[in-house]
Amino acid sequence: QVQLVESGGGLVQAGGSLRLSCTASGRTFSSYALGWFRQAPGKEREFVAGISETGRTTSYLDSVKGRFTISRDFAKNTVSLQMNSLKPEDTAVHYCAARWRGVSSSPNEYDYWGQGTQVTVSS
């Protein structure tokens, strides 16, 4: 089992930055690929970024490439999402998720989910 807890959401003006963090439980953290998803009101859950179990491979939603960076810290069992140059369109509840090896952009392929953290970007 893996338990995930997100933190770091908040309110920021357009052009600002936030750093989301997700802490995972479990001794086999290094065996899981991790992802960040977001869901805005009235919209489907959307893949934002993912990182492989080794940390060597990352994947991003096209609209966040160059602005967001996903990383993981094996010693602390955490995955982070650094979000720069935020836009109002980034406003959503953000979730971290984990799956057994291999980055995927499909929420259906992730086995564990955090509770979500709200990111609000004002214009």
Image (tube, rainbow, N blue to C red):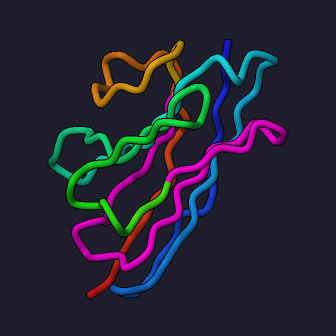
Looking at the rendering, in which quadrant would you find the C terminus? bottom left
Residue 114 lies in the magenta stretch: no
- Viewer-closest of 82 and 116: 82
**Image height of 85 relative to 120, above or below:** below
Magenta range is 70-97
Residue that sits furthest to the left in the current view: 42
At which x and y percent is residue 20?
57, 58
- Viewer-closest of 25 and 64: 64
Residue 93 lies in the magenta stretch: yes
Query: Which residue is pictured at 33% across the width and 85% down the height?
Result: 14
At which x and y percent is residue 104?
35, 25
Residue 120, picture quadrant:
bottom left
**How many marks on residues?**
0
Residue 67, picture quadrant:
bottom left
- Viewer-closest of 38 and 106: 106
Residue 24 left/right relative to 16: right
Residue 24 left/right relative to 60: right
Query: Which residue is pictured at 31% across the width and 65% down the height?
Result: 91
At which x and y percent is residue 66?
34, 67
**Image height of 71 relative to 92, above or below:** above
**Image height of 98 relative to 93, above or below:** above
Query: Which residue is pictured at 65% across the width and 40% down the height?
Result: 5
Residue that sits furthest to the front in the current view: 56
Query: Which residue is pictured at 42% across the width and 20% down the height?
Result: 110
Looking at the rendering, in which quadrant would you find the N terminus? top right
